[in-house]
């Protein structure tokens, strides 16, 4: 063993492993391998030693649970080549000098269960990563060519070794975190890790001077798993946030729904008999703010719907930055291409009815909030209370329920005005530090459409000032959370104006 150098190859993903093994043989390495990897290499006439010849373990003992775990293998990876005592022990114990470990793990997300939990693989990877100053550890087939070139040119640097070790530990963490989350039945475990895999390097983050990348949780049914770029600009972090905000808005509606998003908050939301009508109303809700916005639909964009985007450009001389929809018909795509060369067109497939994620995560620079998703809105309608003398009509109640789904999607403090007849927003006051400020913005934006419209707040009114402003603007009905110490003042103000008011008993903050 003293004058021989070994490479241990044991991979689930066998892409490129044969060519890499040939390079290693040419560089004088003896190949040790296991199971399926051994068979692949042997078929290609590559000289390979079965691992049991090194370990002394019976082949496939305990159904293969003990293929690689052994004193000989782990010692051969772990001993310190700069330590004279280690070198003497390795020689006396006939421990092979394993200078390279190539191992990647079974993708647990494809078939989670007891028998797909790898023990030997992670042990070898961890040992090699710990001893990376002496041992190269390779977990990504995408690195084979780079590493082969570095080895052939004798340019294996300490920096490269450390990079590979870091990637190896991330690979282990990604793998183990999936297993922990698979077994855990606790809603909020004391310790938790969230596995993430990079899917896109973005054009930039929130601003051009910030780099950014998109990561996904394994097995998520998020529409981002099917995100497809059809035309125009690449995505930025801002675009990603706006598309997500749009998806969260339109997923609440069974029928055709559309929204235009700016800076994570809608500037127009509407439903309609088809995608064309929904998008028309969503743009008309606030065409000024729609400039440079992101359009999101919950239905396929056909040619009729695409013409709304063309009209917005040609007649108003306004642009849309991103169109993100479940799918787009070929003729609609051709039209969108002609509207604006740089406008990004993306599809994300059908929005799933139910999420399969455990948590809604929010990151705060070193801290992460894990919480339930704010879903099941429809079930909450049964708990609404009619608190004024005048009660809303059936038509008003229908608009109220549509509007509550809308206000849920708006950044807090949020107050919105819904058209009295059409399921569309007419005024949106979002992201304000005072509720009366949000009310003022929503009413001013709605203008004459406030008359007979529905005013909806995402929380309670702490004073009666917002109700009085709504009455002065001619609002036809009000929806708010209720629960303020001064609720009676708001109720009295609504009664005095003859405005029906409903308490939802449910706050709808979005930050």
Image (spheres, rainbow, N blue to C red):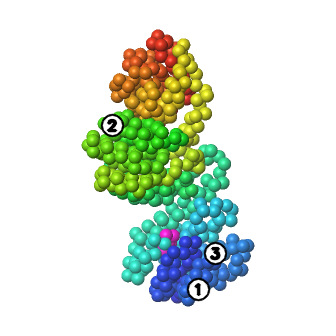
Residue 141 in percent (x, y) is at 49, 72
Q: CA distance from mark 1 to mark 2?
A: 66 Å
Q: Nearer the viewer, mark 2 or mark 3?
A: 2
Under circle 2, the secondary element is helix
The foreground one among 460 and 279 is 279
From the image, tell me which residue sits under label 2: 287
Q: Quadrant of the image for the C terminus?
A: top left
From the image, tell me which residue sits under label 1: 42
Which residue is rendered at x = 48% and y = 81% of the image?
Answer: 19
Which residue is rendered at x = 43% and y = 49% of the image?
Answer: 301
From the image, tell me which residue sits under label 3: 68
Q: Earlier in the sequence, mark 1 or mark 3?
A: 1
Instruction: Look at the numbered discs 1 and 2 and tell me whether their residues touch, using CB distance below 8 Å.
Output: no
Disc 1 crowd, CA 10 A, few/some/many (<14, 14-19, 20+): some
Residue that protrudes farthest toward the left in the picture: 317
Q: Is residue 235 visible?
A: no
Which residue is rendered at x = 52% and y = 48% of the image?
Answer: 351
Image quarter of residue 329:
bottom left
């Amino acid at each position: 063993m003293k004058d021989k150098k070994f490479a241990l190859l044991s991979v689930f993903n066998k892409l490129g492993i044969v060519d890499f093994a040939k390079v290693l043989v040419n560089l004088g390495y003896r190949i040790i391998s296991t199971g399926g990897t051994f068979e692949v290499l042997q078929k290609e006439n590559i000289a390979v030693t079965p691992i049991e010849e090194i370990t002394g373990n019976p082949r496939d003992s305990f159904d293969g649970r003990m293929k690689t775990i052994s004193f000989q293998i782990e010692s051969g990876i772990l001993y310190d080549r700069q330590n004279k005592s280690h070198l003497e022990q390795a020689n006396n114990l006939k421990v092979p000098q394993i200078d390279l470990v190539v191992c990647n793990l079974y993708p647990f997300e494809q078939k989670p269960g007891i028998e797909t939990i790898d023990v030997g693989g992670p042990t070898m990877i961890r040992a090699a990563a710990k001893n990376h100053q002496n041992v190269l550890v390779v977990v990504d087939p995408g690195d084979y060519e780079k590493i082969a070139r570095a080895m052939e040119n004798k340019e294996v640097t300490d920096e490269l070794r450390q990079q590979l070790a870091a990637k190896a530990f991330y690979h282990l963490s990604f793998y183990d975190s999936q297993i922990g989350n698979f077994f855990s039945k606790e809603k909020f475990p004391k310790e938790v890790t969230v596995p993430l895999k990079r899917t896109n390097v973005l054009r930039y983050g929130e601003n051009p001077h910030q780099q950014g990348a998109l990561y996904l949780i394994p097995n998520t049914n998020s529409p981002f798993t099917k995100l497809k770029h059809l035309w125009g600009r690449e995505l930025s972090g801002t675009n990603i946030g706006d598309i997500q905000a749009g998806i969260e808005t339109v997923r609440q509606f069974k029928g055709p729904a559309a929204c235009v998003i700016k800076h994570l908050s809608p500037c127009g939301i509407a439903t309609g008999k088809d995608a064309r009508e929904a998008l028309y109303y969503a743009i008309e809700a606030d065409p000024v703010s729609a400039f440079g916005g992101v359009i999101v639909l919950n239905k396929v964009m056909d040619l009729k719907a695409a013409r709304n985007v063309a009209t917005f450009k040609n007649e108003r001389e306004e642009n849309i930055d991103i169109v993100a929809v479940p799918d787009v018909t070929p003729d609609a795509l051709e039209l969108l291409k002609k509207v604006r060369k740089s406008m990004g067109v993306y599809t994300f497939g059908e929005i799933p009815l139910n999420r399969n994620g455990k948590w809604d995560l929010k990151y705060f620079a070193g801290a992460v909030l894990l919480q339930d998703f704010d879903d099941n809105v429809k079930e909450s309608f049964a708990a609404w209370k009619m608190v004024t003398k005048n009660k809303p009509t059936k038509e008003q109640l229908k608009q109220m329920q549509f509007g509550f789904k809308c206000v849920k999607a708006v950044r807090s403090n949020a107050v919105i005005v819904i058209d009295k007849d059409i399921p569309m927003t007419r005024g949106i006051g979002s992201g304000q530090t005072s509720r009366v400020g949000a009310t003022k913005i929503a009413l001013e934006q709605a203008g004459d459409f406030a008359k007979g419209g529905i005013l909806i707040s995402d929380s309670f009114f702490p004073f009666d000032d917002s109700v009085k402003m709504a009455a002065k603007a001619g609002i036809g009905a009000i929806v708010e959370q209720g629960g303020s110490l001064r609720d009676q003042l708001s109720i009295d103000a609504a009664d005095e104006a003859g405005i029906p008011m409903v308490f939802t008993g449910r706050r709808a903050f979005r930050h």
